[in-house]
Image (spheres, helix red, strand yellow):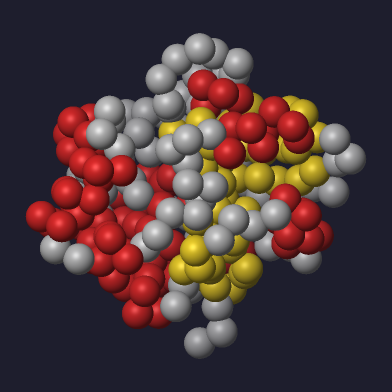
Amino acid sequence: MQLDVPFYLNTNDGNQCMQVTMQGVLDYFLHLKKTVDELDVLTGRKKGYWTYTTQVVGALWEMGLDVKMYSVDPLEPYTHDVASLKQYIRETYPNQFETIMKMSDLPMTIVHSTKLKQMNLFEQRKLSFTEIENHIMQGHVPLMLIDHSVLEDENGNYRGHFVVVTGFGENTITYHESGPKNPAPHRCVSKEQFIRAWDAPGTGNDVIIVLGKREK
């Protein structure tokens, strides 16, 4: 089973894999073509900063897609003030705190997380992979956060990477590897390896299910 989601390359500053996944689903469902720079504006991402999953959800919804985000991490701490959020991040990710502060636009994260809470676009739980496969069989597209170091069997620090999952077999997963290193459409990896990368600490088992064009 494989969905013919258009493939886009991550060729800009290397921190826009989330915007690149957005290009694919916007083209697939709406035949809408956007540059990553335009999607930076729509998600509120500043150059050189990370994009949080919540920023993608709100932007896709605003552009006309029906979406739902799932994560084992709570949304609530990201809906308070900056000082409270900083304290939560310090307590939850003490070893990564300085890096997170350097790469995160916390006020923008709070804006988008609050929007998700108000619009009921978030559910705190881990989807089973059977559920994800069932979504693919219905023509829905999963966007998933993985640890690229785990996927590549590298012994390194966490490298968050957002990908479009395009299909599955009995023991395999296909996804768009947008790059910038070794890009490939419908890259095929073992299901076990992909799930380990999705289960890695830091991903929160984040997944956005893009259901299709939203009814007005």
Residue 200: image location, x then y, percent: 53, 34
Q: Give above or below for 28 relative to 181.
A: below
Residue extending farthest to the left is 83
Where residue 81 appears, as percent x and y from the top left, is: 14, 63
| Residue at image coords 60%, 16% | 153
Looking at the image, residue 216 lies above or below residue 175: below
Q: Position of residue 92 (x, y in %)?
A: 31, 43
Q: Residue at x 66, y 45 (%)?
A: 165
Residue visible at 50% across and 87% down in the picture: 216
Quick check: can you spot residue 136?
no
The image shows residue 53 at horizontal and vertical percentages of 41, 52
Q: Name the residue at 59% across, 19% down.
A: 152
Q: Is residue 126 left or right of residue 19?
A: right
| Position of residue 89 in the picture relative to residue 153 (left or right) | left
Is residue 60 positioned above or below 166 on the image? below
Tell me where residue 150 sits by quadrant: top right
Can residue 30 be seen in this snapshot?
yes
Q: Residue furthest bottom?
A: 216
Quick one: 6 or 45, which is closer to the camera?
A: 45
Image: 3 above or below 63: above
Determine the residue located farthest toward the front in the rendered image. Answer: 91
In the picture provided, is 167 more to the left or to the right than 119? right
> Which residue, as the protein is rendered here, is positioned at the far top?
155
- Which is more toward the observer, 208 or 31? 208
Number of callouts: 0
